[in-house]
Image (spheres, grey):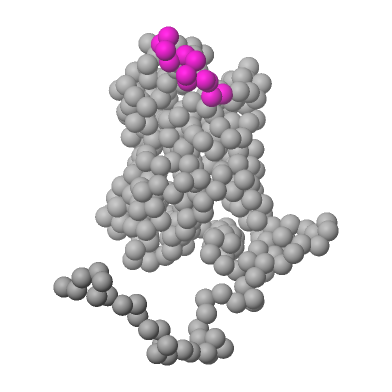
Amino acid sequence: MKRRSEWRPVDLKGIKTSSLRKRKSKVGIDCFASPLRPNAPFKEFLHSLPRILAAEDFKEVVSRIVAAVRGDKMVLLGMGAHPIKVGLNPIIIDLMQRGIIRGLAVNGAGIVHDVEIAMAGKTSEEVEQGLGKGAFGVTNETAEFINSALQDGHRTGLGFGEAIGRALQKEEGFPYREMSISAAAFRLDIPLTVHVAIGTDVVHIHPSTDGAIIGELTYRDFRLFAALVASLEGGIYINAGSAVIMPEVFLKALSAARNLGHRVEDFVTLNMDFIQHYRPTRNVVQRPTAEGGKGFALTGHHEIMVPLLAAAVIEGLEDKV
């Protein structure tokens, strides 16, 4: 082995060069963005985006969703509570009313926040202020309503989501019921499933909670969710703001659907979050589409990206075929 003093820099004068004009390049001016003219319509904004990386993915996702809706295919939204907490209920409800979203799945926290929005027009407490005194997560009205609705649903053979939606739709005393995704799903006859991990939601520490009922109703919903996933051929599955529960539930439901003989191969998956986590990347974007279809990941704040995607899809559906 040479010593340090024996090493000499490489002489680069002998490098063989090539022509820029003959070289294959990944980026060209035909892919560049276009400046917007004053008062340009939204459609022009979409066309102005560069045809590069995430902007190109965004436009392809929009076209895929538009094609799925026009082809009467399933557009299934799975999400955590964060989209609700950043004010997206009206956007999601509008997509449901337009027939774009045809099925929904949420975690348990999503139901807690959705119910509180319907009940009081506000949600999301300050954890730090209450945790030290053991006062976090013990709001009475929220837990009593949810647990009572589940008890009624248990008696009548409903799943978790339908039980909550029915109870909200019947409750005329909630002044903001029209802002509830669960109530809208029940009213519009759109399946909404709820996937609970016992101990993760604040209502689970309330005295009125019955773990057996929660387990049975969320299991009913898992079976219904598996049926929705089984219908995804040619459709779209969107995961928004769930880093663990919904990606895991989706993967198991997909495996069950395929095991039972349902063809779910040519479909699109999309993960939307402000950080791309391991499980959504693997369980939503990559693994489900390994043998067909295509997975996408759009990174950004839900409060910006979801309304942008919704507006682009609505714009696309208004275009003549």
Residue occupying image coordinates x 49% and y 46%: 273
Answer left or right for 169 relative to 271: right
Residue occupying image coordinates x 61% and y 23%: 122
Q: In which quarter of the image is residue 242?
A: top left
Residue occupying image coordinates x 56% and y 24%: 123
Q: Residue 149 at x, y = what percent?
A: 46, 21
Q: Residue 184 at x, y = what percent?
A: 59, 35
Residue occupying image coordinates x 35% and y 35%: 220
User: What segment is highlighted magenta in the picture?
Assistant: 123-134
Which residue of the protein is positioned furthest toward the front in this rendering?
5
Answer left or right for 96 relative to 133: right
Tell me the quarter of the image containing the C terminus: bottom right
In this rendered view, identify the residue nearer to me: 19 or 210: 19
Q: Residue 124 at x, y = what percent?
A: 54, 24
Tell me the quarter of the image containing the N terminus: bottom left
Which residue of the protein is positioned furthest toward the left in this rendering?
1
Q: Quadrant of residue 259?
A: bottom left
Answer left or right for 136 relative to 305: left
Q: Is residue 12 above or below residue 234?
A: below
| Residue 313 counted in the magenta span | no
Number of marks in the rendered image: 0
Which residue of the protein is positioned furthest toward the right in this rendering?
38
| Residue 127 counted in the magenta span | yes
Q: In this view, does 175 lie above or below 184?
A: above
Residue 187 in view here: no
Q: Residue 257 at x, y = what percent?
A: 32, 53
